[in-house]
Amino acid sequence: MNIKEIAKLAKVSTATVSRTLNRVPTVDPILARRVWRVVRQVGYYPNTQARALGSGRSRVFGLIISEISNPFFPQIVETFVCLGMKHNYEILLTPVSEDSREFEAAARRMIERRVEGVAILTFAKSDSLIQVFGNRKVPVLVIDSAVRGPLVKTIRVDYHHGMRQAVQHLAALGHVHISFVSGPANLQSAAARKVAFQECMKEIGLNTPSELLVQGNHTMEGGMRAMTDLAGLRNRPSAVICSNDLTAIGVIREAFELALDVPRDLSVVGFDDIRLAQFLIPPLTTVQMSQTAIAETAFRGLLEWVECERSPFSPEAGVIKTNLVLRRSTALAAHRRMNTTSPTEQELATERGRERTETPSAFA
Amino acid sequence: MNIKEIAKLAKVSTATVSRTLNRVPTVDPILARRVWRVVRQVGYYPNTQARALGSGRSRVFGLIISEISNPFFPQIVETFVCLGMKHNYEILLTPVSEDSREFEAAARRMIERRVEGVAILTFAKSDSLIQVFGNRKVPVLVIDSAVRGPLVKTIRVDYHHGMRQAVQHLAALGHVHISFVSGPANLQSAAARKVAFQECMKEIGLNTPSELLVQGNHTMEGGMRAMTDLAGLRNRPSAVICSNDLTAIGVIREAFELALDVPRDLSVVGFDDIRLAQFLIPPLTTVQMSQTAIAETAFRGLLEWVECERSPFSPEAGVIKTNLVLRRSTALAAHRRMNTTSPTEQELATERGRERTETPSAFA
DNA sequence: ATGAAAGCGCTAACAG
DNA sequence: CTGTTAGCGCTTTCAT
């Protein structure tokens, strides 16, 4: 079954069939109806690759991600793919690890497939790798990257906003000895979170001795290891902020092993707000960063770029916001606990009571 | 840059370039080298769609899944996609919900794309939907389905094996009042789990009043609701088996809200063994079903089918096994707890000590 | 508004 | 073993 057959059956030319299928408005309604009838009758499905070849438009976007096992990503993939379906784009999904050879392979795949645009939501280690797309005139959208160029735009995330709330929240509860468990060193977004943490601490005059800055890797195992290290310190932190929720889960898990109660003995704050966060025990206080928003921004950015021939969103419109979501993994520092009815605790109790497990309420 | 250009630069015919690129062994090494040199020099990437059109082989497999947010699926997607990369296949991923219109749309996409095979790891509600692929001569691999046909093979999962271990484990701990929280009614694999549970209970002479058979939906929210219902019963169960881990998380979370201690007041068993299971508090005892194995079986099945023109694996080779993994969400029933050093408990303590958070050790 | 025909980039007979 | 060439199925000028 091909376009010729349809043309023959509908007694029109292949051009008319093509136009009808593509909804070109100038086709005679009579003919169009005839075509559609045949199409439906024989169950004709136009061949995508032939279409692509003929038109020079593949209608494929590439999506490069890492940490696919991070619960953070499925959401992004789903949103991206579904938007693709809606707009008749196909998504070429490629998970990559840290290995730059993998990235190269991914890029090759994308180019062979003649993708019309690429969203890179991952390790953007070597900028030169991104160049390969630029050389091929393929628009690229990267998250958290400093790479610039006419064919590469950046989706910025305002880590500071949420991080500041997290830090100030802990400070308000009386914590001064606050630790940070970072992500993989070569992951841009992880580095940015760490910097944000340090700056926010400095803002309020708190300093973080290097021993409280421990390296994680955005996995639960990494979080456990970090907690083990932290527990070994002579001057243990009373609160810890994690570079992502997975890490926080590991930290809490190890604290449990060590018989430390969260939040009584240790306040824990995560980052990402994966769906699971509210189901943890205790429900995790974390900085929310909408996965859907990221995927949508990326997709719409590419779409506008490609279809309207204009650069996507103004530099500032593409900024993703972050916000602290209060739940129950943080509590007053021990030295503040004498006075159990301090206004702070009262307030928090109220605020939290409202939240429980329903929709996360943002920290004002 | 196309094959003609390369041919010109390498002073050979396009046929030779094509053969070289496809590693046809009969090409003169001298010419081949010349071709490769040019290819590398100009950074030539053959056009996938033209290739597909010319050869009549798309090298695309379809992957239809649901519950993409279930942590169970990323693993499957990743494995499937990576195997695809390794074998030079592209994966057309389509998440579908319960809505059969979505399934239709997915099928259309796949057919337009001329996929060479489809793996359906989801709601296989109406078998007629699967027929659409058969009509188009597209091989289909379905999980947990009764659909038969020359072009549709089934990947079977042996739910009984793991479920029996779960049931007998609880029974051995002294539980008799065991509840089961099921998954969506129209999900084949969920129905199969429920049946397996009921049969395994019957095997050991335990009966399950219908009030202990509560309907979940494979989400954490569903688990919470189920637990709420269970807690309201005059004759509360002392143990509950869940149709999947997500449900178990919800159950545990709600138990926590109700001040019920898991496992002391309630033993909980999950199903799937998602990576997270071992990081829960308490670490979840669950029936493991290898996500990787499923994805691999599906992919290799399609691959062999397509490349070797022979039906994939013998009916029995494609069976996925399940196994109970003991962790710490189950404990002796209250009435057995008088004698705290019962052999059973001793044994379990030892076995569990071995596990902690390392690789899950299967229940012998 | 419609049709004829020339590609799109590659593969695969077929002939040499 | 290599080159010539006719498709693959669709889109898109260019006439009409």
Image (cartoon, coloured by chain):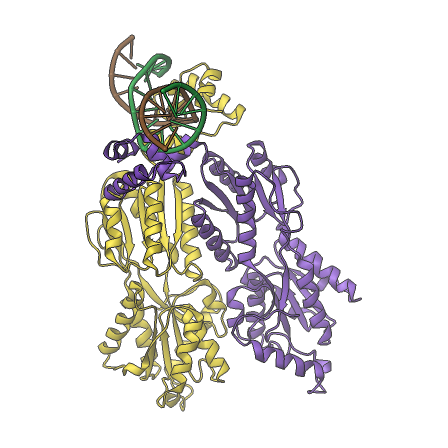
Chain colours: A yellow, B purple, C green, D brown
Figure check: A162 above or below B263: above
**A41 relative to A341 in the view: left or right:** right
Figure check: A173 above or below B312: below
Figure check: B162 above or below B27: below
Figure check: B178 above or below A96: below
At 26% from the left and 77% from the top, the residue drawn is: A201
Q: Position of residue A10 (x, y in %)?
A: 47, 16
* Residue B161 appears in the figure: yes
Q: Position of residue A186 (x, y in %)?
A: 30, 65
* Residue A327 appears in the figure: no
At 55% from the left and 70% from the top, the residue drawn is: B253
Q: Position of residue A318 (x, y in %)?
A: 27, 54
Query: In terms of depth relative to the viewer, which is nearer, A357 or B335?
Result: B335
Which residue is situated farthest in the left direction here? A149
At 45% from the left and 50% from the top, the residue drawn is: B81
Q: In which quadrant of the rendered image does the N terminus of chain B lie?
A: top left
Q: Position of residue B125 (x, y in %)?
A: 61, 44
Q: Quadrant of residue B277?
A: bottom right
Q: In which quarter of the image is residue A284?
A: bottom left
Query: In terms of depth relative to the viewer, which is nearer, A70 or A345?
Result: A70
Q: In which quadrant of the rendered image does the C terminus of chain B lie?
A: bottom right
Q: In which quarter of the image is residue C5?
A: top left
